[in-house]
Image (tube, rainbow, N blue to C red):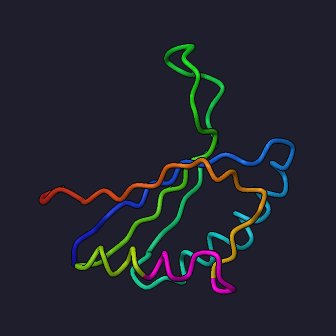
């Protein structure tokens, strides 16, 4: 089965970072891990130490490892659950985000 990395960059709504982190940690990670094919989840916060002084658009990064031979089916299942009782979205999550899926190269 092919491996993929679902990479999500996000920010909280200003002034609601604690609420955002609580929702992400206690609810959203579990909801994503419940999707068939998602085998791991990790979250990161932008470090204060960077290579340049350039502003970064996102403070948080989530990495989800996925095993599937049908990425479109995974995407369809994710979209169909998003915003439902199976995967509620917190209003503390800024709607400006970035989400991409990467395919693992053979031999890696």
Horizontal arrangement in the rendering, residue 107 relative to residue 40 (left or right): left
**What residue is at 54 percent from the left and 17 percent from the top?**
54
Give residue 104's position: percent from left, percent from top: 23, 59
75 versus 77 height, above or below: above
Give residue 25's position: percent from left, percent from top: 71, 64
**What residue is at 25 percent from the left and 79 percent from the top?**
70
Horizontal arrangement in the rendering, residue 85 relative to residue 103 (left or right): right
48 versus 13 height, above or below: above
Horizontal arrangement in the rendering, residue 16 relative to residue 10 (left or right): right
Horizontal arrangement in the rendering, residue 12 relative to residue 80 (left or right): right
Using the image as rendered, state which of residue 50 and residue 28 is in the foreground. Answer: 28
The C terminus appears in which quarter of the rendering?
A: bottom left
Q: Is 32 part of what is drawn in magenta?
A: no
**What residue is at 57 percent from the left and 13 percent from the top?**
53
Q: Residue furthest top?
A: 53
The N terminus appears in which quarter of the rendering?
A: bottom left
The image quarter in which residue 107 lies: bottom left
Q: Which residues are magenta?
A: 77-86
Count of marks placed on residues: 0
Q: Is 85 part of what is drawn in magenta?
A: yes
77 versus 14 height, above or below: below
């Amino acid at each position: 089965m092919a491996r993929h990395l679902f990479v999500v960059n996000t920010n909280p709504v200003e002034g609601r970072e604690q609420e955002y982190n609580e929702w992400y940690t206690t609810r959203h990670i579990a909801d994503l891990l419940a999707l068939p094919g998602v085998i791991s989840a990790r979250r990161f916060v932008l470090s204060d130490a960077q290579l340049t002084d350039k502003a970064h658009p996102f403070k948080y990064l989530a990495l989800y490892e996925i095993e599937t031979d049908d990425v479109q089916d995974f995407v369809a299942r994710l979209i169909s659950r998003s915003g439902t009782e199976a995967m509620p979205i917190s209003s503390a999550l800024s709607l400006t985000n970035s989400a991409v899926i990467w395919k693992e190269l053979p031999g890696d």
